Image (spheres, rainbow, N blue to C red):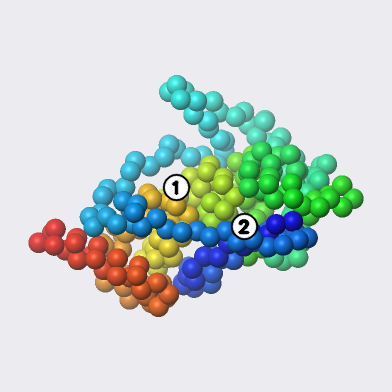
Amino acid sequence: MASPEIDYPRLSSGSESFGGCFNIRIEGEDSRHTLDFHEDRKSPVYNARNIPEPPSPPGKICSKSITHDRGHGKSDRVPNETRDTWDKLFKDGYGADVHISTDNGSFIPAHYTLLRIASPILGNLLQQSKVKNGIRCIKILGVPHDAVFIFIRFLYSACYEEREMKKFVLHLLVLSHSYSVPSLKRVCIHLLEQGWLSPENVIDVLQLGRNCDVPRLIVVCIRMIVRNFITISSSEGWEVMRRANPTLEQELLEYVVDADSITQ
């Protein structure tokens, strides 16, 4: 089957939940393809010389249930019993017809039909996979096993443990973008903005925000960098970014200069 390989820029090792670079790939029987992520240099976020206020945050996100907006000022909340049923189906693995192998050599049982509905990208990859004894086998490599477990569980029920979500939030942001799961991406952004960002990790998060097409998170990171420039510019993350991406360093310096000129 086809095997996307997704490379992300090398990041600092200062963040507890992640270090090195992401190299996420799904492997099967056949050839390998690469998915490239390019920044749009014409985008307002990319070229802006002033730093706007970030847009309004998304609606309240709750790990206990998932809410669907129907566009009429109302929302329908999935009953706890329904959510718990889907969560139990995932944890028990009853009738699973997919095995997802991870970096630690173990596998996560899942269901082909549900994965196809929850993630069109996973669905396309699974369609190309070979079936052996009624089981489709794929590999999601390049992120910790626990991050893949949280990701697949979320596809079933939108359930997660907040402590675990925070621990692997950067990996999950990449997975949500790579496999087109916008609801998970919103949860990751919410957690990152609610106290997770710090001078030590903001450079890493900024680079991921650019690669994962998260304009609001990019703006929030830039504002933090401008406000704490002296501290952040002496961090390990800045040094790694300066060597790997001098163009980004120059852009950030221009933001700082522009902000200084406005305040004078």
Instruction: Name which residue lies at 81% across and 52% down.
Output: 130
Mark 2 residue crowding within 10 angstroms, few (<14) / some (14–19) / many (20+): many
Kindly tell me whether residue 161 is visible in this rendering. no
Residue 148 relative to residue 16: left or right: right
The answer to whether 78 appears left or right of 47 in the picture is: right
Residue under the image location 87 percent in, 47 percent down: 134
Image location of residue 99, percent across then percent down: 78, 53
Mark 2, secondary structure of its residue: helix
Q: Quarter-wise, where is residue 93 in the image?
A: top right
Type of the residue with mark 1: His
Task: Give x and y (percent) for residue 43.
Answer: 35, 52
Q: Is residue 112 visible?
A: yes
Measure the C-alpha gap from mark 2 to mark 1: 17 Å
Q: Position of residue 20 (x, y in %)?
A: 53, 72
Please determine whether, in this image, residue 73 is positioned above or below residue 244. above
Quarter of the picture containing the C terminus is bottom left
Which residue is painted at 33% across and 57% down in the image?
46
Question: Which amino acid, mark 2?
Answer: Ala
Q: How many marks?
A: 2
**What residue did someone put label 1 on?**
190
Image location (x, y in percent) of residue 111: 76, 43
Q: Which residue is the site of mark 2?
A: 147
Q: Work out whether residue 254 or residue 130 is closer to the camera in this orientation and state it.
A: 130
User: Which comes sooner in the sequence, label 2 or label 1?
Assistant: 2
